[in-house]
Every structure is written in C-alpha cells, then in structure tokens.
Image (cartoon, coloured by chain):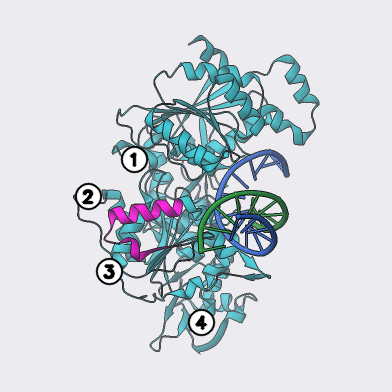
Chain colours: A cyan, B green, C blue
Amino acid sequence: MADGPLIVQSDRTVLLEVAHPEAESARHELAIFAELERAPEHIHTYRITRLGLWNARAAGHGADDMLGTLDRWSRFPVPPSVSLDIRETVGRYGRLVIERDDEGTLVLRSSDSAVLTEVSRNKRIQPLLIGHPAPDTYVVDAWARGQIKQELLKIGWPAEDHAGYTPGTPHPIDLAENGWHLRPYQQQAVETFADGGSGVVVLPCGAGKTLVGAGAMAETKTTTLILVTNTVSARQWRDELLRRTSLTPEEIGEYSGQAKEVKPVTIATYQILTAKRKGQYAHLALLDALDWGLIVYDEVHLLPAPVFKLTADLQARRRLGLTATLVREDGREGDVFSLIGPKRFDAPWKEIEAQGFISPAACYEVRVDLPADERLEYAAAADEERYRLAATAPAKIDVVRQLVSRHPGERILVIGQYLDQIDELADALGAPKITGATPVDEREELYGAFREGEISLLVVSKVANFSVDLPEASVAIQVSGSFGSRQEEAQRLGRLLRPKESGRTASFYTLIARDTVDQDFAQNRQRFLAEQGYSYTILDAEEVAAA
DNA sequence: TAGTCGGTAA
DNA sequence: ATACCTACCGACTA
C-alpha cells in the first residue's frame, strides 16, 4: 500500500501511524506477532520479537501470513533483511520435536541433522540427553522434559512438544445445563486449548476466564488442580464452578493457609506451593496428592518464579494458563512459553467490547501543573524522593474533586498508591477509604454499600488491585500508580469493564504531574492498554476545571 | 480447637 | 529504584 499506516524498519521495529484510516485494521493483524513497545500520541512502535513470532506460529499463523500483513499495510517496501529474518525465525519453531518412541521413551527428534547435532552439543543440553539410538533421535532424561524445552528456547530452537499427557484420574465434570452457554470466544478458546493439550489463553479482565477453565475441565473430565493468586480468588473459582458445572461442594477442595483439603477438584494458592519449612518446600506433596489430569494456572503472568521450577517437573500433565496479558515485568515470558505452553488463544479487548461482553471505556491522562514552590522542591529533591513528590502532589486533589463532579450519579473509585495521600483524599472528598489496614468486615461493609449505591465514592489503596470485584463502578480516577507496572494499569481498567446495565461508557482517568517522572512511569503503564486498542486522551487540568 | 497476633517473604 | 498488600506460619490465649 503506497500510503499505508505502517513503516517496517530493518531493526525489526514497526511504526504505526495512529491517525491513519487503516490503522486499526493494521494494528489488529500486527498484534498477532509483534509487541507494542511505545505508544505516544501519533506514532506507535511495535517490535517483532522471536517469542512473538513463535507464539503466532504455535497458534497456526505461518510466515507468509505475517509477511503478508507487513506487505499489505506497509508504506515502503519491507526491508529484505526483515522478511528473511521472520522467515528464518518462524521456520525454527517445530524443527525439533519432543515425543515418545514406540516403547514410550521420551525422545528429541529432528529430520534436520545439522540442528540436532548443534543442540546436542550445547553444554546445558548435553547432560539432559542420555542416549542416541538413531541418527535423528536422542533419548531425553525422563525428568528433563521441561528443562530441555527451556534450554532449547534459550538457544533459539524451541521444540514442539508432542510427548502427550498422562490421562489423570477420570472424574465426571459437565457444564451446568440451566440455559447457560459458553460465549463463542470462550468456546473457541476451550477448543483450541483442547487440541493443543497445554498452553495459555489470553482474555481481558471481565471476559470470563474462569469459564474457559470450567470449559477445559468439562472437556478433559479428570481430577483438576487449580492454582490461584489468593484465597478470595479461590472462593470465586469455587462459587463459579458450583454455579456453572455439575460439581458439588463435596468435590471441590481448598488448599491454602487456612484449609488443607484435597478433593477431585482442588483449588490451591501459589503461595502455599512456595512456602518453605526448614528450607524445604512444605507442600510439594500436593502436586502428587492425586493423579491430576489437568492443572489450571490462573493469572499466569503472576506465577512466582519458584513455581516455574516445580512446573518443569509437571510436563506430563495438561496445563492451562489463563491471563489478561503475557507481559511479565520480570521478563520470564520465555518460561511461560516453555513450561506452560504457547499462546493458544487471544482476543483483543476491543473485539470483545464490540460484541458487547465488556463495556467500552474511555481513558484520559490528565496533566496537572505543579505550583511554583512544589516545582522547586521537586527540582531540588533526590532521585528516590522525586516520584513520591510528583505522584502525591497536593494539586491533584482539586482535580479529583472536579472530575468527581463531572460524573454525578455514577459509582466512582479513587485509586492511590500512598497511604498518606489516600488519607488526604478521603478527608478532602468526605469519602470513606479502604486500605490494607481496614479490617476485613469493615471492607465488606463498605464494598457492599458501594454495590448497593449507598456510597457512590470510595477511596482505595492497592487493596483494590486484588480480590475485589466492583462491577458497578463506572469511573476510576488513578492519582498515583506504581513504578511502571503494565499489569496494574490493565487490572485497574478491568475493574470498570464489566458490562453495565445502563450500557454506558466507563471512564478511566490517570492523573499525572506534568514534566516529572510521574509522566514517564505513566507512559510505561499505558503501553499494554494501547496495544489492546485503547487510546488515551490527554487533558489539561485547566480544561477539566473549565468543563 | 478456634481465633488472634506479629514476623517474614515475595 | 518504591511502597504496599497478601499469604503463610508459629506462638499465644481461652
């Protein structure tokens, strides 16, 4: 396309012109294999990474599809080095296969003897290979199935795993038949997962990931271990499974700090797996307590590092990872790919929104000027003080008040990161607050009142990142956020995306002190949402005051 | 045996 | 680079 929205550069970055009429179509196709790196106003930068290409390949997209996307939307000819690179990288996936020979022994095979020789000589892989019975075959140590996949990925030769799964103990599980059905995209996610046997399903917050889990369980019909981030989430899983499947309370157990039940379907926290006593993992037995046929990893982007290690030993069990984003701030995306599996399904937020399953949202970045004295204090402050100063600027309080008055009759959350700031905000707005220090029963009471509409304004700390579901909220005002976590931003927006009865658009404001580090961090946080097709409208605090 | 509290890890 | 929240465990009380 002579005047297309994309510019493909030889350093594997792709520039997208946001205002171009075809930008959204191009973004949609590009996002299949490229990761958004920067998203300022006019030009968004994507990067073509190996992992992105392999995930796309595993999901069934070929090099021709991806090159077709670039050719179709690119303003200038795609640099030949990039085309070649994409072709080569995509071609690397699946050249090596892990499977079982006729006797059921775990083997690494390839028809490409050069590649096989190369990897077999690698000093981290060699110890995992314990035999070489045929020119195209190496025997892999039975315990090393996960480890060898990790090492192979690291040296750029990801193996496709066809070694199969242990069936697990059969257990009857069906979806409840009470006039309820999986949505089309959930059904599709379940089917592609079932075909692949293990891997990750990426769906936005509020799109019903739990039901994809339930669907996968109904498909495999075996004893299932579900790993979740916290106990509230464990209860939510339990309630949802009771409501949506044939499972009864007697069949579902909770294994956490509070309860140690092992039942055909067991829901455990990640933390209990990583808990140590006398230097030893104290609850490893859980992993073999039953012959699990399926392991579900909820919020797989939050999987703690030690659980990767344990998961390396669980490669014979079917694994389903659920997440709203594959992005990990610790950069262990490769381990998710190797040990849980490649991405099997993902649907952009905007698409699910278009189908009416999550509500539309408008995002605003409100830039607040610091008054002269604070500006001076900021300039003089040491680096480690600066973020806090900028993020907690008192000037933000007035802006919050104005924003609140723009949304009469709506349920509004004010979200902050510093307890002092939260105290000030609650005072200034005359609104109740919830922080980690708020006793659990008081929290329940306030959340309940918010849901019922007795309270329409609530000031919350990071507690709101976890464990609460406030579908009635249609406005969120973020006054300070942590140091650039993309997940956090996504999660906060997700709080607002549950469909409203009114069908109205949700509003997400993030307040930024102009010309400070606050602005830099915010940009990092917004990246993920921009990738999903949300754009931030930049407002000036004065415009807000005027409106 | 259940409930609460403080320390610790991540 | 932070500050904050959560979960787990062991000790204590009754």
Residue depth check, mark 1 versus mark 3: number of the one nearer the observer: 3
Instruction: Read off the residue under disc 1.
Output: A351
Q: Identify the secondary structure beneath mark 3.
A: loop
Cα distance in 3D space between marks 4 and 2: 43 Å
Mark 4 or mark 1: whose residue is earlier in sequence? 4
Mark 2 or mark 3: whose residue is earlier in sequence? 3
Image quarter for residue A319? bottom left
Amino acid type, callout 3: Pro
Cα distance in 3D space between marks 3 and 4: 30 Å
Cα distance in 3D space between marks 1 and 3: 34 Å
Mark 2 or mark 1: whose residue is earlier in sequence? 2
Instruction: Read off the residue under disc 4.
Output: A142
* Magenta-colored span: A233-254
Residue depth check, mark 3 versus mark 4: number of the one nearer the observer: 3
Q: Is residue A8 above or below residue A476?
A: below
Q: Residue at x 55, y 47 (%)?
A: A10
**Other-residue count near label 2 (Cα within 10 Å), few / some / many at <14 / 14–19 / ≥20:** few
* Front-most of residues A446 and A88: A446
Q: Is residue A537 above or below residue A281?
A: above
Mark 1 or mark 3: whose residue is earlier in sequence? 3
Q: Mark 1 and 3 residues: CB-CB less than 8 Å, in contact?
A: no
* Front-most of residues A256 and A19: A256
Q: Residue at x 30, y 49 (%)?
A: A185
